[in-house]
Image: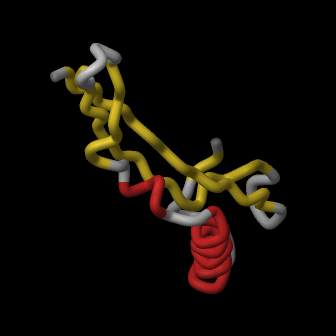
Amino acid sequence: MKLKIFNYSTKFAVYDTVTLNKYVKMTWQYNGGTFTGGYDSNGNFTWIESYAAPALQVSPETIADTAIYNYNAELVSYGMIVNYYPE
């Protein structure tokens, strides 16, 4: 049996026209998963995903909604982007 670790990340940037005039990364996730591999009865090697990276389970719509929410919350709280940084 073999084990292969992989990393996966998602991010979403919003173009800030209020302060920076740049894309600002408003949400991101980074984590890993694993594939386990082994040989079947015919001697063929196969990889099987044994632990999926949690970031793979988040829909693109959820990521986009979170980014827009974070951006709007920054503008309401501070009037500009304070806690997030350009790409």
Relative to the observer, which residue lies in front, 50 or 56? Answer: 50
The answer to whether 33 appears left or right of 38 in the picture is: right
**Residue 24, image x and y in percent?**
66, 53
Residue furthest to the front: 42
Q: Position of residue 7 (x, y in %)?
A: 39, 36
Question: Which residue is pictured at 59% across the width and 72% down the height?
Answer: 62
**At which x and y percent is residue 67?**
62, 67
User: Residue 8 sits in which quadrant?
Assistant: top left
Seen from the viewer's position, the closer of residues 52 and 83 is 52
The image quarter containing residue 33 is top left
For the point 67% across and 79% down, which residue is it?
A: 72
Where is 40 relative to 54, above or below? Answer: above
* Side of 61 where 3 appears, left or right: left
Of all residues, the one furthest to the left in this rendering is 1
Q: Percent x, y for residue 60?
A: 64, 62
Q: At 28% across and 37% down in the image, what residue appears?
A: 34
Could you say which is closer to the camera, residue 17 or residue 28? 28
Q: Indicate the colouring scheme.
A: secondary structure
35 to the left or right of 68: left
Question: How many discs mark residues in the rendered view?
Answer: 0
Q: Quadrant of the C terminus?
A: top right
Residue extending farthest bottom: 76
**Which residue, as the protein is rendered here, is positioned at the far top?**
43
Instruction: Tell me the quadrant of the picture where the N terminus can be found.
Output: top left
What residue lies at 36% left-to-right and 49% top-to-bottom?
53
